[in-house]
Image (cartoon, rainbow, N blue to C red):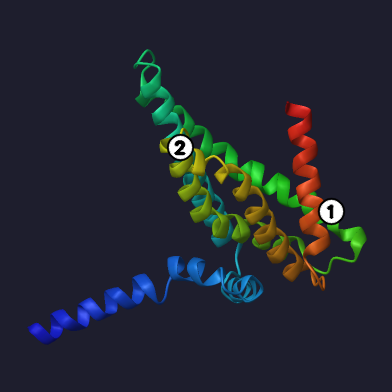
Amino acid sequence: MNDTRKNIQKSLIKVLFFSGFFPEVFKAYFDLKASFFSQLAKCKSEARLLAYGFTISILLFFERLPEKVVSHTSEGFQRPLLPAIGIDLFASIFFVPLFLYLVSAILHLTLLPFDGKATFFQSRLAFFWSIIVCAPILLIFSLVEAFFADISPFNFIKYITVPLSAWILSSVLCAAEGFSSPLPLFLSLLVFYMFLLFLIT
């Protein structure tokens, strides 16, 4: 009985920390290019890609949740919190996957004139996988920004997430497209972000 329990514990530890989806995300930080080709070898159907899209929807929902809870608390419970969370979750599940497909199509068409070698499926997979890899960083930084926003050492957190996410996205996309260096795309994404920020403000 004890041997069976030990075997179960070892199997559980192996699944959680050394194999499976979450360890793959963690290992991706050490080799983004290899992580994409590993996903490409496993992901052969649109169904799995769609599952990734819904996973991203849930992850982005949780990324926005701390700020929503903190802002609701600071407003003195003037608005009901649960309905707002429910609406946000509904919008995330039903609209975020469509938005992801749209953005991945735009990125694929944009990179085609630059001799991009990826198929539309490979380009979508690269885009989806890069967001999944970015998700833990965004979740951690959203928690820090929501609960420690008034502490000065943490004020710079929001300026770190953008270049980190841009680097992950450019590295994975360039691996899919067969580009030699992710640096041009990385710089282009940063310039595009600054341009959007200028338009908003």
Residue type for callout 2: Ile
Q: Between residues 49 and 68, which one lies in front from this camera angle?
A: 68
Above/below status of 98 relative to 173: above
Residue at image coords 59%, 41%: 96
Res. 8 image quadrant: bottom left
Above/below status of 116 relative to 197: below
Give the residue pinned by disc 1: 109
At mark 1, the secondary structure is helix
Tell me residue 10's x, y (percent).
25, 80
At mark 2, the secondary structure is loop
Q: Residue furthest left?
A: 1
Above/below status of 149 relative to 105: above
Q: Can the viewer see residue 47?
A: no
Q: Earlier in the sequence, mark 2 or mark 1?
A: 1
Give the residue pinned by disc 2: 151
Tell me residue 79's x, y (percent).
39, 15
Residue at image coords 67%, 57%: 127
* Crowd tier of the residue under label 1, counting other residues whose Cα lies within 10 Å: few below 14, some 14–19, many 20 or above: some
Q: How many marks?
A: 2
Q: Residue furthest bottom?
A: 3
